[in-house]
Image (cartoon, helix red, strand yellow):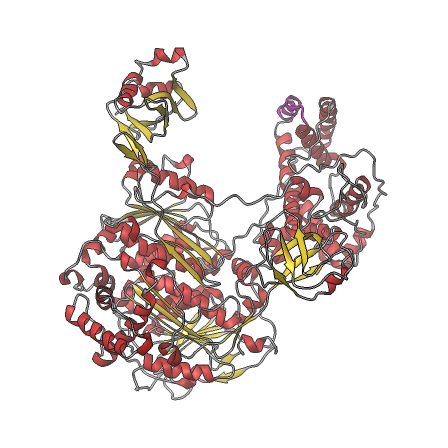
Amino acid sequence: MLPSKRAGAGEVVEDHSTNTGETLLKKPRIDFLLSCSTVETTGNNHTSNNTSSNNSNLNSSNHSSEEVFKPSNMALDDGKPAEIDEDLHSRQLAVYGRETMRRLFGSNILVSGMQGLGAEIAKNLVLAGVKSVTLHDEGTVELWDLSSNFIFSENDVGKNRALASVQKLQELNNAVAISTLTSTLTKEHLSNFQAVVFTDISFEKAIEFDDYCHKQQPPISFIKTEVRGLFGSVFCDFGPEFTVVDVDGEEPHTGIIASISNDNPALVSCVDDERLEFQDGDLVVFSEVRGMTELNDGKPRKVKNARPYSFFLEGDTTNYGSYERGGIVTQVKQPKVLHFKTLREALKDPGDFLLSDFSKFDRPPLLHLAFQALDKFVCDLGRFPSAGSEEDAQKLISIAANINDNLGDMRLEEIDNKLMRHFAFGSKAVLNPMAAMFGGIVGQEVVKACSGKFHPLLQFFYFDSVESLPSEPLDSNDFKPLNSRYDAQISVFGSKLQRKLEEAKVFMVGAGALGCEFLKNLALMGVSCSREGNLTITDDDVIEKSNLSRQFLFRDWNIGQAKSTVAASAASLINPRLRVEALQNRANPETEHVFHDAFWENLDVVVNALDNVTARIYMDQRCLYFQKPLLESGTLGAKCNTQMVIPHLTENYGASRDPPEKQAPMCTVHSFPHNIDHCLTWARSEFEGLLEKTPAEVNAYLSNPSEYTSGMKSAGDAQARDNLERVIECLDLEKCESFQDCITWARLKFEDYFSNRVKQLTFTFPENSATSTGALFWSAPKRFPRPLQFMPNDPGHLQFVLAASILRAETYGITIPDWAKNPNKLADAVDKVLVPDFQPRKGVKIETDEKATSLSTASIDDSAVINDLVTRLDDCLQKLPPGFRMNPIQFEKDDDSNYHMDLIAGLANMRARNYSIPEVDKLKAKFIAGRIIPAIATSTAMATGLVCLELYKVVDRGHKVEDYRNTFANLALPLFSMAEPVPPKVMKHRDMKWTVWDRWVVQDNPTLKELLKWLKDKGLNAYSISCGSALLFNSMFPRHKDRMDRKVVDLAKEVAKLEIPSYRRHVDVVVACEDDEDNDIDIPLISVYFR
């Protein structure tokens, strides 16, 4: 199981009295939160004993005891806004925002049914940080459960499922109160919760509970979900009227106005800096418009005929003032009210089903019928259909047919008996990949129910992955249980595929959020869990506090330890049979001696769990080279995608890429910002220049002064001049020896950045200046700046000086006095600083070319200036104490005590004030400047579940391209889009065909002449052969004919300077060819074997 819990985190208390229990505080749901601050109600947990049967959570009437888990630090509501641990929840805050997080912190959730699906849902909710989770289950742990539940071990068999789950779930987040109910659930229990989730409940009981929840004031959000083999379902009812505060979670779209017509309707044109994302019917507001000031009234107006860079405004501006310049148009996000049907109503009239796969557009109505038929089968017979039993399958089909005959207008014309047979065979099993996928979906729906953030599922969602079944037919003996932890999985896939899974040799790259989920899934599936199997995981990163909110295999006592090692140990506790090797190597060209040819050739499949495109591209190229399947996935907030890269069947990952993100021109960032992103990009650049690069440059000089100055003289350019000037500033002109010196430096930096530079800019380009074409220079998107005057009573000004002076002191090793953080004493120290007057100068060049890549201005006398600077540096060196060095500071965004983000936020916000750009708080600044990728546990869980459904196909080795699925999903909308992968492009020549997956092999250590003849025999005339960046042969070079009798490998060593490792038996060459008609033919890479 998972790493052991620290002492004191919680204890299990058994209470044998009747009708007593822990009081759960209930806060009103989102609709009421919009109009009132705090309302609390109370309710009691009731008592019961353990019983075990199918649908055991709700069908027993015996009750005599209750077990309640009481954590040591209960999340009590004292009427104050919940404190958010930003270090822990920073990635989640980037998705949800503070208000949603506070609502989650006040939400009490019931999860009924603690098999694999219930465990996944509970895990995601505990990681999200809800106030409390109550686990309900009357059944006991069976060996069967270990196929899908990461919480249980073989030692838990026979224990109550809810009680056995508490300790491991509590370790995930001690701020969440986790309690248990082991008695029969009654309607009265439900009044304690904002949302209730049922994973193992009959339709009869579900209808009763949902009717109760629907009628409450406020309504209790009700979710019924099931995973049955490779089939799953979700039903949501959030009440008669549910308000969605934010339907998609995206930032409001904005545009910079270029012109507005006096017309009806008015045409609004925006600058072509970025495409507008407005849609017809959107509401927008205007601000900062000059001339047509009537639009600045804050009144929302409707968009018509939206185009990429313009739109019409529903309204008459004929009598408004004439537009002059400026203006921002911003989308107004509107709340949306949804009306949910009860389950009783929705079963008869389900409305539109949410589709996931358009190749199965007719599947949801059939599954709607199948799940009802299964419910009746279980109610009638008290058990699920047996795996492989044709008799049980026919009974289920018969029940479905009877239900279908009574549906009237909803009746299906045909029931797919083959699909129903698959449904029957696997119906008892909860598979881990399905549980992971639906655990993510349902966990997100609970968050929506508690917060109003994102659009809920309305109302049924059905999914199947029958393509994951083995390609060869199975007989009934294959499904027989083996009395093992994998019996549930065997009941769906058979014992042969189970053996293949256990013998698989897997390489997983990354042990972060995706990696933790993958490891859990693989351990539960039994992947690499036999002597023949092996799982290698590598990650060079260490655990940080911010990882703990979604990388669920880690605990706070693991902070600072290697991710791969801790994750592998935790996965081994989930399944002790897992054969896993943890490495701390980054997968890149420098580690190919670790991940060598023999390593790659021995693999069956590669699983990417990466967070950057560069590493993905490298892994894609390696998988192409060695022809290994690559299972790729990624997440961004509530979005996730999966891509299957299968040798010879699909295109590779690198065959199609997203266009690179548009970068703001350097001159925009440095002189003409028009949004907060520009300000933060500049702030991050200044931070690194002042506190990391310049001190490092100083140390480079001090380490070897003569070599350093000699290098600068040799360079003799503007960059060398700038480097020397910065070094002299640190060692002479701006050298700090006391904390007061640091305060002086910080105060003068404020004056330079936010006053002097702005004065110079507006002196060079006055407000009414024009371009060479006669257009206003300060026209959109440029914003005219105003200098700031330092005010010691302005918290923003003083905070900037505090952060800058503390970090400056750190670079010099100066002790920071206790009084520094006292605002009054700091203000007194700042008041002592003499700030010289500033006069703008004529002739100062300010870069306005958007294509410029450097702000350094070359000068004809750079060399003379550099010689003078070197002389001054030599003088500085004589005055320094022996061994003097500066301390470069590397930016660290996730430590709120280090003042890094304080300085960056201060730099950005003061600059924003210069340009009248809205400021941001430190957290938002951290997201942008720290380039934080928004991440939540739910989308991660879903992505890994989907990938592992594909893993069954890869390990089986018999599936066609049409059986595989690539997925894009957005849990916020919700949207699920699944499609077949794109096949690779096929090249043809004569009777030969090849794709990007092919590599031609030439054996027996050929000479250059023999290689050319080998190609000529295929009708290919090679005119160029290269190895790496070196040219081994080109038909245009007469001297290359002298190489004809040389071995290709010897040429590679001599010409390309190729160092061939002892384990490698070949060299790779790239050959450019033509056919006999002089047409270029793009052929595969050629591997020339020499031993």
Point out the stretch of residues depicted in magenta.
706-717
Picture coordinates of residue 858, whole percent (x, y): 70, 28
Q: Is residue 1074 above or below residue 498?
A: above
Residue at 34 percent across and 53 percent down: it is 965
Is 62 one of the magenta-colored residues?
Answer: no
Picture coordinates of residue 63, whole percent (x, y): 32, 86
Q: Is residue 73 visible?
A: no
Q: Quadrant of residue 473?
A: bottom left
Q: Is residue 450 visible?
A: yes
User: 785 or 735, which is in the foreground?
Assistant: 785
Rendered-image quadrant of the N terminus: bottom left
- In the displayed orientation, state which residue is furthest to the bottom: 18
User: 9 or 1045, which is in the foreground?
Assistant: 1045
In the displayed structure image, the side of residue 335 where residue 499 appears, left or right: left
Q: Quadrant of residue 1024?
A: top left
Picture coordinates of residue 646, whole percent (x, y): 32, 45
Main secondary structure of the magenta stretch: helix
User: 502 or 303, which is in the foreground?
Assistant: 303
In the displayed structure image, the side of residue 947 where residue 88 appears, left or right: right
In the displayed structure image, the side of residue 362 where residue 893 appears, left or right: right
Picture coordinates of residue 1091, whole percent (x, y): 25, 25
Q: Is residue 107 above or below residue 683?
A: below
Q: Is residue 205 above or below residue 710?
A: below
Count of residue discs: 0
Residue at 27 percent across and 60 percent down: it is 466
Q: Is residue 343 above or below residue 413?
A: below
Residue at 30 percent across and 51 percent down: it is 962
